[in-house]
Amino acid sequence: MIRLRRQLIACSALACAVTPAIAQISFTSAVTLALKNSPKVKTAQADVDKARATLEELKDAYIPNVVGASAIGPPSYGFPLGQPSIYNLNSQSLVFSYPQRDYVRAAKQSLEAATLSLKDVRESVAEDTAITYLALNRDLERQAVLHEQQGFADHLVAIVQDRLSAGQDTPIDLTSARLTAAQIHLARLRMNDETIADQAHLARLVGLPPQGLDTSVSSVPPIVPAQAGNPSTTTIAATSPAVASAYALAASKREIAFAENRYLLRPQITLDAQYSRFAKFNNLQDYYFRFQQNNAAIGVQITLPFFDAARKAKARGADADAAHAEHDADSIRDQFLDIRLKAQHATAELAIRAEIATLDQQLAQQNLDALTVQLNSGNGNSATAQMTPKDEQTSRIAEREKFLAVLNANFELQQAQISLMRESGDLESWLSAAFDAQPVAPAKP
């Protein structure tokens, strides 16, 4: 009994090792994991953190800093050199500066640009994940359809082989049937390659192993068509994070240029404070009247730059950078409008194609149903040709081919609709509605 139990355990372990594990992941879980694990999102988040730190650094220039030091040395010979201090404290802060306020405003615009860029990257990753998820779902459905179609083709070859032996078909008919079966086999191989590629891409996005990665059709939220329109520049900036980020970056460059141009002929005020405790072993008290160890000083320094050729050149360069950034923002806006217009027309065309493919498949299914009825009951008319099992398999192969066209057309329509939602600013609300409707759950092994 013990040996038998060990053998059963070993056989079970071998079956588990041979059978590939299947991990089904929902649509919302895939998007959530992709946003969490994406290196692009992490890079954009690091840019936001850097921009926030830069803004805090510019604001902290108004906060006094404190630096401590010591200048202890051996006893001096003769008149002491310098001011030997046991320890000293220095403090300095900016009180007033025209350019500094502009630099702070520029840093705020830069932080806004980085935040909008992060939002754009997150939408890009979410779009890529959604489209890849739908592509893998289509691949798995096509695999099942091609498996059925391969069975019909193999059955057709067997039927034609029997008819050829009975003298009812010609070798050309057999070659044609075998060619159909070989074409379907090639399509299955190509489909397997596409499935593996989409599985690997989705696995890299969500951070899971690609082997056995499966989708859940019921978890995909319905896609709401985006509303077409002719938005203004303000609406475009609010709709597209990429466009808004470009204009925020241009505003930051313009604030920097404004600061560089306001450097000359404008005062800058700084506050300086110092405390030192002098040492006595350097004989300093022998050479100074009323020597004391504790010494402090505080004062305000006012600087008024009159002429600085390098600063003038730097201001001209900042103006050029600002103009360059503004023109780049306009180019990104125009490119966004072109892409959005093409996406609107492509979505409308693909919707009609999907409807045509669906009607074509329905017509093929209706013809197949009529043919099946004739095969089961006979056509009852000697004037027309009698339907044969060969005709049935041919019709089934044609109907599955039409269904494959429906799957491809629907996926292309979904892909265009998701891209249009991103261009229209509706992708985030669509995903938020999906998250609210379906709780996020981890992948099920």
Image (tube, rainbow, N blue to C red):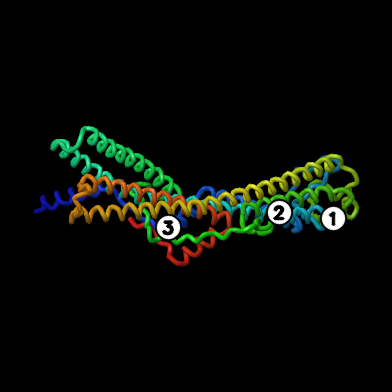
Q: Are marks 1 and 2 in contact (CB under 8 Å)?
A: no
Report how many numbered discs are placed on residues in the image: 3
Q: Is residue 209 visible?
A: no
Which residue position is annotated with label 3?
27
Please tell me whether mark 3 or mark 2 is closer to you in this view. Answer: 3
Specify few, some or many for label 3: CA neighbours under 10 Å numbering under 14, 14-19, or 20 or more. Answer: many
Specify few, some or many for label 2: CA neighbours under 10 Å numbering under 14, 14-19, or 20 or more. Answer: many
Up the image or down, 169 lies above or below 261; here it is above
Q: Helix or strand or loop: what does disc 1 sit on?
A: strand
| Three-letter code, disc 2 | Ala
Q: Quadrant of the N terminus?
A: bottom left
Residue 161: x %, y % from top left:
18, 37
Up the image or down, 440 lies above or below 155; here it is below
Which residue position is annotated with label 2?
107
Q: Where on the picture, by quarter, is residue 171?
A: top left
Residue 285: x %, y % from top left:
85, 50
Which residue position is annotated with label 1?
269
Q: Are marks 3 and 2 in contact (CB under 8 Å)?
A: no
Mark number for residue 1? none
Q: Nearer the viewer, residue 422 or 103?
A: 422
Task: Give the Cα separation between the discs numbered 3 and 2.
Answer: 38 Å
Q: Quadrant of the C terminus?
A: bottom left
